[in-house]
Amino acid sequence: MTLRFAYNTNGAAHHRLDDALQLIKAAGYDGVALTLDIHHLDPFAENWSAEAGRVASLMERLDLACVIETGARFLLDPTAKHEPTLVTADAAGRARRIGFLKRACEIGGMLSAEAVSFWAGVPKPGIDRGEAMGWLRDGLTEVVAFAGEAGVVPCLEPEPGMLIETLDDFAALDIPGLRLALDTGHCLVTGEREPAAAVREFSERIGTVAIEDMARGHHIHLPFGEGDMDVPGVLDALEEIAFGKLICVELSRESHRADLMIPQALDYLRTCRRPGPDLAAGQETRRQ
């Protein structure tokens, strides 16, 4: 089967959204992972609905499919990265995060997104884990119900250091309707599973996939070829499970050279699917 690739706009933070979409299309991607942010379809702007409609029209003209991402650093609080979250002690803060995720689902519906991806958050020191888990479950239940009404697929992404960190943490939640946002690089950080094995094991629950290179034990998104990711092996596994949704390249530290990285990343992925003799031998060595 033919795998479908997208590029995450958090790796084009210095570009206007329209320019980023044009670059992604020109490189040959099938879609975009749109990280809602202050400069890329601000979900709290007064004209957010009109802007979402405009972007939806542009993406339709460009024939780009979409996944909605919600990992913007300072969208909710300009003084604290990624806060508030679903496990913030302050109830009003949790409600603000839930409101944002609902808005993301609304926008996802307007853009016909394949999925809306989000994460749990990091409990602050002194917070009881059981209490935080209760907040998380309540928040997820509310968001999943709203996503169903909006017609989008809600996906939780295990993130290193967060309350839901591993695939086992995700599986233990067992919330009906909640799918997995699998960032294959995170498996190398936590050491829980090999990325390709994770794809196969959770094939029935995956709603969206992110891919990049990453060094074992270090949560730094790297360009392909600079880490320990067996990219061909992951792509093989995705083909085996007939994964037809977008596979999203996430290079959030590469915005300063997005003009180069957007096409280079896709060229690498395509080369992985069409290896010549020398490359195939090198890939086989890498997998051993």
Image: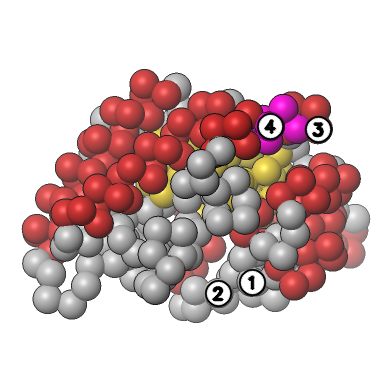
The circle drawn on residue 253 is 1
What residue is pinned by disc 2? 220
> Which quadrant does the C terminus fall into?
bottom right
Relative horizontal placement of residue 200, taking residue 246 as reference (left or right): left
Dot 2 falls on a residue whose secondary structure is loop
Give the mark nearer the N terminus: 1 vs 3: 3
Q: Can I make out residue 138 in this image?
A: yes
Label whose residue precedes the other's in the sequence (2 or 3): 3
Residue 281 sits in quarter: bottom right
Among the two numbered marks 4 and 3 on one chain, the one whose residue lies closer to the N terminus:
4
Mark 4 — residue?
Answer: 54
Asked if disc 4 and disc 1 are in contact, CB closer than 8 Å, the reply is no
Point out the residue furthest to the front here: 46
Q: Is residue 55 magenta?
A: yes
**Residue receiving disc 3:** 62
Q: Which residues are magenta?
A: 54-58
Name the element at disc 1: loop
1 vs 2, front mark: 1
**Percent from the top left, x then y, of residue 285?**
72, 69
User: Mark 4 or mark 1: which is in front?
Assistant: 4
